[in-house]
């Protein structure tokens, strides 16, 4: 069992499994997927299920959400809600009430560490000689282009994201003594 695993890829990463599928399970902590500068697509020949066993499901979009099933659809955007069907439209409720207009615009935070210039990027997990992550530890990074960057590793021991137009070496000098200074 590996304690930490980080994979940095400059161009593309593909995983193909022919028979028994793929499982991604986190016993503790969140699972995050991001498409920082392009679309994200989920496609299945059969059913796609999104289930929250103990809480809620939120679908949030800055501009528009459309749900389409068999040609019937509902679209939600800032100017209103549109729903349509070629078949029967049924509404059922134990109680139905109309109220004044209202809206709730959620704050959508921009993606952290996004890089949109096609450049190379990587971050490093800093560990001591025993493989223990060096969390919240100052470091100095010497880049091949001659620049020197300073930073502090995060709560998991990772550096900030390094970005460059081409692949280059990065020499990291950890400064643990600066923590107690």
Image (tube, grey):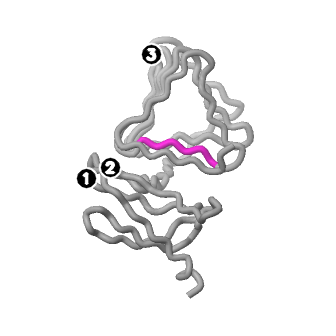
As drawn, is 132 to the left or to the right of 67?
right
Tell me the residue at 59%/19% (across/down).
47
Q: Does the magenta stretch include residue 148?
A: no
As drawn, is 17 to the left or to the right of 10?
right
Q: Nearer the viewer, mark 1 or mark 3?
A: 1
Mark before the other along the chain sequence, 3 or 2: 3
Residues drawn in magenta: 30-35
Residue 5 image offset from top left, x and y in percent:
57, 47
Q: Nearer the viewer, residue 58 or 143?
A: 143
Please tell me whether mark 3 sits on a helix, a strand or a loop: loop
Q: Nearer the viewer, residue 88 or 117?
A: 117
Residue 85 image offset from top left, x and y in percent:
46, 17
Q: Quadrant of the C terminus?
A: bottom right
Cβ–Cβ under 8 Å for marks 1 and 2: yes
Residue projecting furthest to the right: 54
Please tell me whether mark 2 sits on a helix, a strand or a loop: strand
Q: Tell me the chief SS of the magenta region.
A: loop
Q: Can residue 78 be seen in this view?
A: no
Q: In which quarter of the image is residue 51?
A: top right
Instruction: Using the numbered discs, state the Cα–Cα distance from disc 3 to disc 2 in whole angstroms.
Output: 42 Å
Q: Which of 54 and 145 is in front in this view?
A: 145
Q: Can residue 169 be seen in this view?
A: yes
Instruction: Using the numbered discs, state the Cα–Cα distance from disc 1 to disc 3 in whole angstroms.
Output: 45 Å
Q: Which residue position is annotated with label 1?
A: 165
Q: Residue 106 carries which label?
A: none
Q: Which mark is residue 120?
A: 2
Q: Which residue position is annotated with label 3?
A: 71
Tell me the residue at 65%/46% (across/down).
2
Tell me the residue at 35%/44% (across/down).
37
Mark before the other along the chain sequence, 1 or 2: 2
Q: Quadrant of residue 155?
A: bottom right
Residue 105 image offset from top left, x and y in percent:
47, 52
């Amino acid at each position: 069992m590996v304690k930490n695993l980080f994979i940095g890829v400059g161009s593309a990463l593909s995983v193909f499994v022919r028979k028994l599928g793929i499982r991604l399970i986190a016993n503790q902590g969140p699972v995050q997927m991001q498409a920082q500068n392009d679309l994200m697509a989920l496609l299945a020949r059969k059913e796609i299920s999104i289930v929250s066993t103990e809480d809620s499901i939120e679908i949030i979009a800055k501009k528009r959400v459309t749900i389409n099933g068999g040609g019937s659809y509902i679209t939600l955007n800032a100017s209103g809600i549109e729903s349509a069907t070629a078949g029967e439209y049924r509404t059922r409720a134990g109680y139905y009430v109309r109220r004044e207009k209202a809206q709730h615009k959620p704050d959508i935070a921009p993606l952290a560490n996004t890089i949109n210039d096609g450049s190379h990027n990587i971050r490093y997990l800093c560990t001591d000689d025993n493989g223990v992550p060096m969390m919240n530890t100052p470091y100095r990074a010497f880049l091949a282009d001659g620049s020197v960057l300073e930073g502090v590793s995060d709560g998991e021991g990772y550096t900030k994201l390094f970005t460059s137009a081409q692949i280059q070496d990065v020499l990291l000098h950890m400064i643990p003594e600066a923590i107690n200074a």
